[in-house]
Amino acid sequence: MENRVFVVTGVTSGIGKALALDIAKTGEMLVMVARDGDRGSATLKETALTTQNPNIDLQLCDLSILSSVRNLAEILKSRFEKVDVLINNAAIYKRKRVTTIDGFEEMFAANHLGPFLLTNLLLEQLQAAVQTNGSARVLNITAPSTVRLNFDDLQAERNFNSLNVFGATKMANLLFAFALARRLESTGITVNAIHPGVARSGLMKESFAPLRLFNWLISSPPQNVTENIMQAAIAPEFEKTTGKFFYRGKAIEAPAYAYDRDAQERLWEISEALTDLSTTKGVLPVNDPQL
């Protein structure tokens, strides 16, 4: 049994930072993915000093920029033969509509397209982990959003409401998780979504003051919510569980729309086209005879 390789995005604050610390304490190989170099380096030093784990690596990536995601995937492929656990944790909230250099609305790009592309580009490394250690896991950190996707205005070009757009990206995380779980059924790679609860972080720093205050009052310290994520990431009893939505360590029902296969597949096809995924070599084939 080789050391497991964990890849965690969004590690410079909040849940991601606390989660990285928990993983580092296991002594396994931890790859921390951060957008900001200075904050990423500070988190790396703090985590290494606290845990004394020499198996920690920092990689920089802006998940809202597709070339940055592809670059990260290539680096990970060159440095690691396998990835045992991929945790898509990073997320952003923008009060005003911003477009990326690729021309995408930034929340849609960072919260959905980036994780969608990264996960698909690392499928071969996840499959290699199955061959080595018997299983691999993908976890999407999200929320029980009830926002339905407006496929006629998916990037809110005509009607931008920041909270609605953010909620749509969280629903996209659910749709993607369930669609991917179905595709990878029986491959040994499990895919689950996790609602960690409300944790204190800088995620909503651009929101209106009353909302920031409300979130602060109802939230918990990040370290209080990571235990349940760790269970899904490493506990043997979760090894074969796939296509589920977890909250506090137990499977719960996601909003009904998240199970809509038409919505799942329409989002997948659009995401595949926007990321040029169909032209990428090495992506595992669809494993769903009903598609």
Image (cartoon, rainbow, N blue to C red):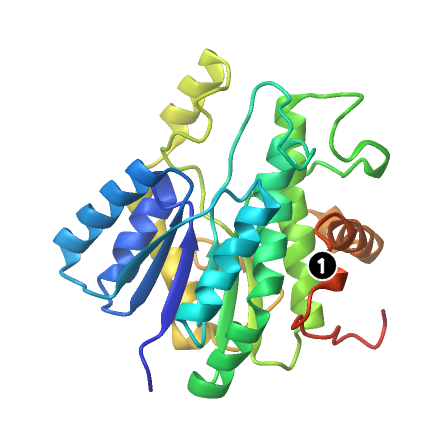
Residue 269 lies in quadrant: bottom right
Residue 153, percent from left and from top: 81, 31
The reply to whether residue 144 is in sight is no
Q: Residue at x 30, y 59 (%)?
A: 57
Task: Report whether 187 appears left or right of 209.
Answer: right
Residue 181 in which image quadrant: bottom right
Q: Residues within 10 Å of mark 1 (few under 14, many from 20)?
A: some
Question: Which of 162 and 124 lies nearest the eye of the viewer?
Answer: 124
Count of number-bearing discs: 1
Nearer to the camera, 215 or 127: 127
The location of residue 219, given as percent across then percent down, is 38, 32
* Residue under label 1: 277
Say if residue 210 shows up in the picture: yes
- x and y, in percent, of residue 266 in the image: 82, 52
Residue in view at x 48 percent, y 55 percent: 72
Residue 60 x/y as whole percent: 40, 47
Q: Is residue 174 above or below residue 98?
A: below
Instruction: Decide which of 104, 88 is in the foreground and name it.
Output: 104
Residue lying farthest top?
A: 209
Point out the image quarter for the C terminus: bottom right
Q: Is residue 204 above or below residue 5?
A: above
Q: Residue at x 66, y 76 (%)?
A: 185
Amino acid at pointer 1: Leu
Q: For the N terminus, which image quadrant?
A: bottom left
**Quadrant in the rendering for residue 35:** top left
Left or right position of 58 against 170: left
State the residue in front, 61 or 227.
61
- Which element carries disc 1, helix, strand or loop? helix
